[in-house]
Image (cartoon, grey):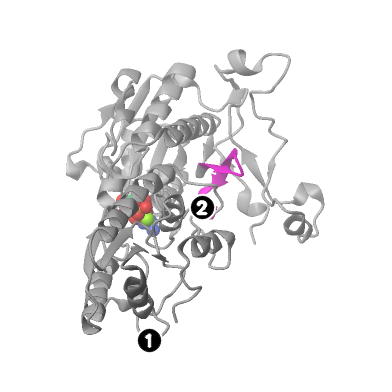
């Protein structure tokens, strides 16, 4: 259970500098645009959750609100900022970079902003990556394209070398945009910064196309990815209905969490089966997927199957799974395995079949953000700048129950967000597809 202590945000020190935004936003009679530091955001949102703690109100776990402060920690004229993107692509990365640069330069008057190239290796001299000067002119239209203008990478880098680079370039604030691995890497950087007694703020904007960061409403890029995924489901459905024994099979992202598969299926109500990592399924046997699918094809002539990449990994045979440069387990291709097993099963029962396999993952990850995600990315970037200028460190900015908050990095990587097999989202998927509650 998350406690009051888990939610304590680290700061570099007291805020003594008047914020340049104060005059425009907060120095009026009202304080409506600045954060009221004493008012925090309750972590629990039901009476039973809050009441179950048996605590006086002020001891209930609560989050520090995001947003502009009247007084800040860093003097903008003397502040130098670095930005890095790591891990896989996700729609909205360029929007976040753009939002950070515009907010820093236009509203706080920070003039020196650099981008590190290709993830954490951009800090390490032996890779020979030059830093990029980021100005409003450079970033103004980068949100038109997917990907990240800074490039990205996987693979471990020595946090001491990263902090060497921060010292060499006199960086006071580092923004990291990346997933769980990137946030863990940032925590290592914070540790070394502390060991050296430096005053460098490290603030994260969490990136996860799978929506598997815990405690936050939804990650940026998720909505865009899900909308793209619906196109593949629809294409699979058209293909399936256009051929005798047509079966459309779509593999979507979702290594540990099946949110994209679930939401894309609900948005484009064309799928008959959805398979996600959180819900194990039997392939063979009287109540297994293959028998059910065969009966469906025999009765209706076609079917659409959506599978998240992390589902059914126990069926991937062969050697130990490999690992990528960052140490993440490489997943076996469940889509290909299903295609093979479906064809074998239907052939064995003399059922005509035409399986069309779609694997749109890279095409989905690389698209530009949709307007919802663009707006969200911009606001996350604003919140990240406010947090960093106020000296907050080892935090990510996030939206929880529609409010921007500061969440300590250790909490953000303490667990993953999953589709609850007993929850209402999975129930909606079962209702939409009509698939059995279990293949067993
Ligand atoms: P994605 O969601 O795409 O996997 P990610 O941020 O988790 O994003 P990774 O490739 O796992 O992507 O990690 C990105 C960077 O963070 C790499 O440089 C990697 O070495 C570093 N990193 C990953 N895990 C850790 C860890 N446990 N401790 C320190 N650094 C890490
Ligand atoms: Mg990861």
Q: Label 1 belongs to which residue?
A: 285
Q: Quadrant of residue 411?
A: bottom right
Residue 152 picture location, percent across and down: 27, 44
Magenta span: helix, strand or loop, mainly?
strand
- Image quadrant holding the C terminus, namely bottom left
Q: Magenta segment range? A: 397-412
- Neighbor class of circle 1 (other Cα within 10 Å; few <14, some 14-19, many 20+) is few
How far apart in space, not on screen, are marks 1 and 2 (Cα)? 40 Å
Query: Secondary structure under badge 2?
Result: helix
Mark found first going from the N terminus, 1 or 2: 1
Which of the numbered marks, if any, corresponds to residue 25? none
- Secondary element at image label 1: loop
Instruction: Kindly indicate the quadrant of the structure image that contains residue 369.
Output: top left
Q: Which residue is tagged 2?
A: 412
Residue 239 seen from this side = yes
Look at the numbered disc 1 and say if its residue's Cβ is closer than 8 Å to ligand 2: no
**Horizontal side of residue 267 vs 141, given as left or right:** right
The x, y position of residue 346, in whole percent, is 25, 78
Instruction: Please identify, in this view, whether the residue under mark 1 or under mark 2 is nearer the observer.
Output: 1
**The magenta stretch spans residue 318:** no
Camera-side residue of 395 and 344:
344
Rendering quarter of residue 298: bottom left
323 shown above or below 379: below
Q: Nearer the viewer, residue 215 or 344?
A: 344
């Amino acid at each position: 259970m998350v406690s009051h202590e888990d939610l304590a945000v680290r700061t570099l020190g007291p805020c003594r500098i008047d914020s340049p935004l104060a005059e425009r936003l907060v120095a009026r009679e009202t304080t409506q645009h600045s954060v009221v530091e004493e008012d925090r955001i309750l972590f629990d949102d039901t009476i039973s959750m809050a009441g179950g703690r048996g605590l006086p109100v002020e001891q209930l776990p609560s989050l520090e609100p995001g947003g502009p402060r009247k007084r800040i920690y860093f003097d903008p004229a003397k502040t130098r900022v670095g930005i890095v993107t790591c891990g896989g692509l996700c729609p909205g990365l360029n929007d976040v970079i753009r939002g950070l640069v515009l907010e820093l330069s236009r509203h706080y008057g920070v003039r020196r902003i650099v981008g590190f190239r290709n993830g954490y290796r951009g800090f390490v001299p032996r890779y020979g990556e030059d830093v990029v000067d980021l100005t409003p002119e450079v970033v103004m239209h980068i949100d038109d394209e997917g990907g990240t203008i800074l490039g990205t990478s996987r693979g471990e880098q020595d946090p001491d070398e990263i902090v060497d680079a921060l010292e060499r370039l006199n960086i006071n604030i580092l923004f990291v945009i990346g997933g769980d691995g990137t946030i863990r890497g940032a925590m290592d950087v914070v540790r070394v910064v502390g060991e050296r007694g430096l005053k460098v703020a490290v603030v994260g904007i969490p990136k996860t196309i799978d929506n598997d960061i815990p405690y936050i409403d939804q990650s940026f890029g998720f909505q865009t990815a899900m909308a793209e995924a619906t196109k593949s489901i629809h294409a699979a459905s058209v293909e399936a209905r256009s051929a005798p024994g047509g079966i459309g099979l779509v593999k979507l992202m979702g290594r540990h969490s099946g949110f994209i598969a679930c939401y894309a299926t609900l948005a484009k109500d064309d799928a008959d089966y959805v398979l996600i990592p959180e819900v194990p399924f039997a392939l063979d046997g009287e109540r297994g997927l293959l028998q059910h699918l065969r009966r469906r094809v025999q009765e209706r002539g076609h079917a659409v199957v959506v599978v998240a990449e992390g589902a059914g990994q126990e069926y991937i045979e062969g050697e130990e799974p490999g690992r990528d440069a960052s140490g993440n387990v490489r997943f076996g291709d469940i889509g290909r395995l299903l295609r093979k097993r479906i064809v074998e099963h239907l052939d064995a029962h003399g059922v005509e079949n035409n399986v069309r396999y779609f694997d749109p993952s890279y095409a989905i990850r690389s698209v530009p953000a949709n307007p919802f995600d663009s707006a969200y990315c911009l606001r996350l970037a604003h919140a990240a700048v406010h947090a960093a200028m106020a000296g907050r460190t080892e935090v990510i900015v996030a939206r929880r129950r529609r409010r921007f908050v500061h969440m300590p990095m250790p909490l953000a990587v303490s667990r993953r967000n999953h589709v609850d097999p007993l929850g209402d989202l999975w129930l909606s998927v079962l209702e939409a597809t009509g698939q059995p509650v279990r293949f067993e």
